[in-house]
Image (cartoon, rainbow, N blue to C red):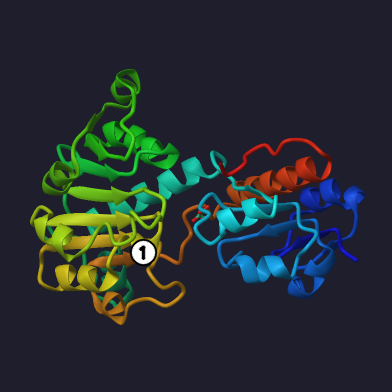
Amino acid sequence: MARIVTTFPLPGEASELLRPLGPVAGPDGWRDALADAEALLCLLTVRVDAALLDLAPRLKVVANAVVGYEHVDVAACRARGIVVTNTPDVLTDATADLAFALILSAVRGLPQAERSLRAGEFHGWGFWDYLGGDLPGKTLGIFGMGRIGQAVARRAAPFGMRAIYHSRTRLPADAEAALGAEWVDLDALIARSDVLSLHAPLTPDTRHAIDAGVLRRMRPGSFLVNTARGALVDEAALVDALRDGTLAGAGLDVYEHEPSIHPGLLELPNVVLLPHVGSATRETRTRMAMLAARNAHAVLSGHPPLTPVR
Ligand code: DGY
C-alpha cells in the first residue's frame, strides 16, 4: 500500500520529506508497488509509457529526477491527468563543467597520454611528445542553447575560445552579448566549429541531427563533444568520420544505445569515453533527488509542482 514509489535510492532528506505523506516503496520491487502509487520518482533508465501507466491507475505525478524526459510519454501522462516534472537548473553547472572537461581531454589528448604513461612509455620529458592542440583562438560551436548550452558558452571566453551557437530559438540580443555568443545557421555552425558541443534535447527533430552528411561538412581536424543524448548523433557515422580522419577526435558521455557502446568507438584511441556522468557529483545528484521529491510532495499536497514539464 505505498503512496509513493521510487525506482532509485533516495537521500535521507528526501525520504524524510516524503514519509509524512505516506509509505514509500522501492527501489526493490518498485514495479509491483505501482498499483496504489500516487507519485512515482524515476530516472531516465525507466520508460514511462502507457503500459507502465496502466499498472499505476492512481498516479498523480511522475517526478522524473533528471532534466531530459524523452523516456516519459508526456502526452500519455497528460491524457490521464498525471503531472510530469523534471530537474532543470540544478545540474546545469555540473554538466557544463563536464562538457569542458571533455573538450580539454579530447583536444589535449589526455587519455592517450595517460594510457601511454600507464603502459610504461613515459621515459622523461620530451619536447615533441604528447602534443595536443590549443583552445585559445579556436571556435566552440554549441548546438542547442538552453540552460546547459548557455553555461558552456559562458566557459568559452575564459579559455580564449570564440562561441557560436545554433538553436531552435535565438536568444535576445542582450543575452547573446552577455554570453559573448554569436547565433549562426546550422551550416555555418558545422563549417566553422573547431569543437562542436551538443546540448539539444532529444526529440524526433533532433534524432541523428549529426549524421554522416553533417560529419562530412565539419572542419577537418575538428572535435565532437556530446554530453546531451547519444541519439543526437548517428554513432555508426561518427565511427566512420573518426576512422577516416574527418574528425580529429571526440569526447562522449552519452551513447545512442546506452548502455551498449558502438564497438568501433571502443577501438579508437582518439575518443574520450565516459559512462554518462554529466551530472554525477554528490552535490548535484542530491539536488536532483531533492527537487524530484519536492515536486512529488507539492503535487500530493495539492500545490503546483516546482518544475513541471510543459
Ligand atoms: C539528465 O538529467 O537528463 C542527465 O542526462 C542526467 O545526467
Q: Residue at (78%, 36%) from the top-left corner?
A: 303
Relative to 277, residue 270 above or below: below
What amino acid type should be assigned to the residue bearing mark 1?
Ala
Q: Quadrant of the C terminus?
A: top right
Q: Residue at (25%, 38%) from the top-left corner?
A: 165
In depth, the one of 128 and 150 nearer the eye is: 150
Query: Which residue is under mark 1?
Result: 231
**Residue that extends furthest to the left in the rendered view of this protein:** 220
Q: Residue at (42%, 41%) from the top-left corner?
A: 148
**Residue 189 figure quarter:** top left
Instruction: Tell me if I can see residue 134 in this picture.
Output: no
* Residue 293 % position (x, y): 74, 48
Q: Secondary structure at mark 1?
A: helix
How crowded pointer 1 is (Cα within 10 Å; few <14, some 14-19, many 20+) is rated as many
Q: Residue at (11%, 61%) from the top-left corner?
A: 216
Relative to 4, residue 159 above or below: above
Q: Quadrant of the N terminus?
A: bottom right
* Residue 237 % position (x, y): 21, 70
User: Does the beta carbon at disc 1 come under 8 Å from ligand 1?
Assistant: no
Instruction: Tell me if I can see residue 40 in this picture.
Output: yes
**Residue that extends furthest to the front in the rendered view of this protein:** 79
Compared across the picture, whether 181 is left or right of 310 comes to left
Relative to 109, residue 84 above or below: above
